[in-house]
Image (cartoon, rainbow, N blue to C red):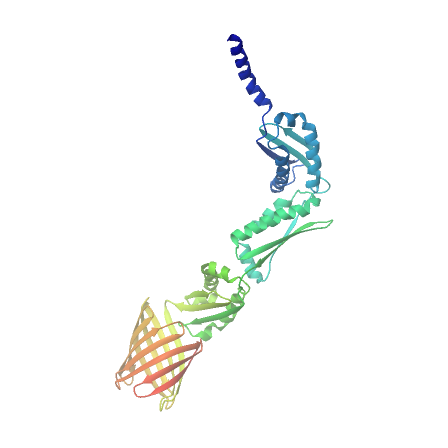
Amino acid sequence: MKLNTILILAAMTCLPLQQAFSAQIENVSVQVVDVNGGTSQILLDKMSGSMQVVADQLFLDKDVAKVAAAGEDYKRLLTEIGDRVFTGYELSEVRLQPGAHTEIVLYARPWNRIISQPTVDLQFSGVEPQTAELLQQRIPSLKRELEQAISGASEDAGDWAGGVLRKMARQQVEERLPEFKAAVDVVQDRQSTVVQVVIYPVGQLVSNIKYELRSEAIPNILLMELKYKYLSECDRLRGLPVAYVQAHKAELEQMLTDKLLAETAVQKFHLQPSVRLTPGANLGVNIMINSDDYKLWFEGYGDIGRDSDNLSGKAHIGKFISPRDEAFGEAEVILDDVEWRFGAGYARYWGKSVWSYMRRMPIGDNDYRLEYNLSPKWRLRAEHFSGDDRNEFGVRYRIHEFLSAEYVYGGDEFYLRIIGNL
């Protein structure tokens, strides 16, 4: 019994020792170090990843003791493989520490010269230069990150390093400019290294601009210089992806609004610009110049199908006494017999509707008017003149900022009114 007990105890004691000497490698970590210290960590991580695949194949599930015994052979093998994989670098030393968790450190140095001052040429294809500046603000660190990634690397490593730079650029563009794609190429000569990055739009693009700038606060003729200036400003949006305009609609509207607010004429007359974009291949840009202080307009009327008083003109001068209340005066001339009429009144604004009352002189009658804006181009009008107890109804369509047409029913006749407004 004693002998059997001794044998069992001996076996139990030797078993852990046997297991220790026959332990297997469960995982491997590979680290590549540049002995010169110049290669960026992102390129070193790429090199480490390439050798990690090799190391996993060589060592996983292998006996630790056997790997330790053949350590020098494994080091030579890793050196040969590394010299083939790391174009532009040579391995000067390999450290192998076998164990359940095996650690491998590869020390590399560049073959010849290193990249010291790379140039990153970042371009946006298919968009205006000013728009490109706006887009570049969304990826402000890309150029710097690419420069840092390739600086200090071997000049002969340009091909595989370019793959790393392409991945970096594409990831950042995909994250911050998902409506664009990036193409990256590394160009080298004896004097310099240039990283060419071309960012280009994808999907449906803005091909045309439907632009309008107008005002109901001041005569549009006073805004002609501003109108042509912002026609060029809005034309810079041509070539952008429609999806980008849709995603950044509020930002683009605010950008144009801020530029308008900085205009001398806008500040001088205390005007309030508002911008509305309608995304699409034909991008709609509607700019309205309003005022919280006054309302001025001049209109000329030519009535087709009316028996008398078919040529006339009117001037309106109004002052807002509150955001919804306007006190105004109007002067009207009937050109048939050059008859002048003057009036003073009050208007109340709410939503899309305007109600107004005016006392007209010298005829001494009252004018009651209700207008409703169906849309930026369509307007309904109902008006009552107490002097001859006449009602007038009109449907007005704005052709552009200087010309409108209104179909009018004036008591007992229908006629078409052509309206020219300054």
Q: Nearer the viewer, residue 261 or 33?
A: 33
The quarter of the picture where the C terminus appears is: bottom left
The reply, left or right, for residue 346 in relation to residue 38 is: left
Residue 121 in picture, x, y percent from top left: 63, 54
Q: Is residue 328 above or below residue 205?
A: below
Residue 160 in picture, x, y percent from top left: 66, 46
Q: Is any part of residue 35 visible from this angle? A: no
For image coordinates 55% across by 50% down, the residue present is 172
Residue 289 in picture, x, y percent from top left: 42, 68
Residue 299 in picture, x, y percent from top left: 40, 80
Q: Nearer the viewer, residue 76 or 419?
A: 76
- Tell me where residue 85 sits by quadrant: top right
Q: Is residue 108 above or below residue 324?
A: above
Q: Is residue 232 above or below residue 419?
A: above
Q: Is any part of residue 286 visible from this angle? A: yes
- Tell me where residue 316 sits by quadrant: bottom left
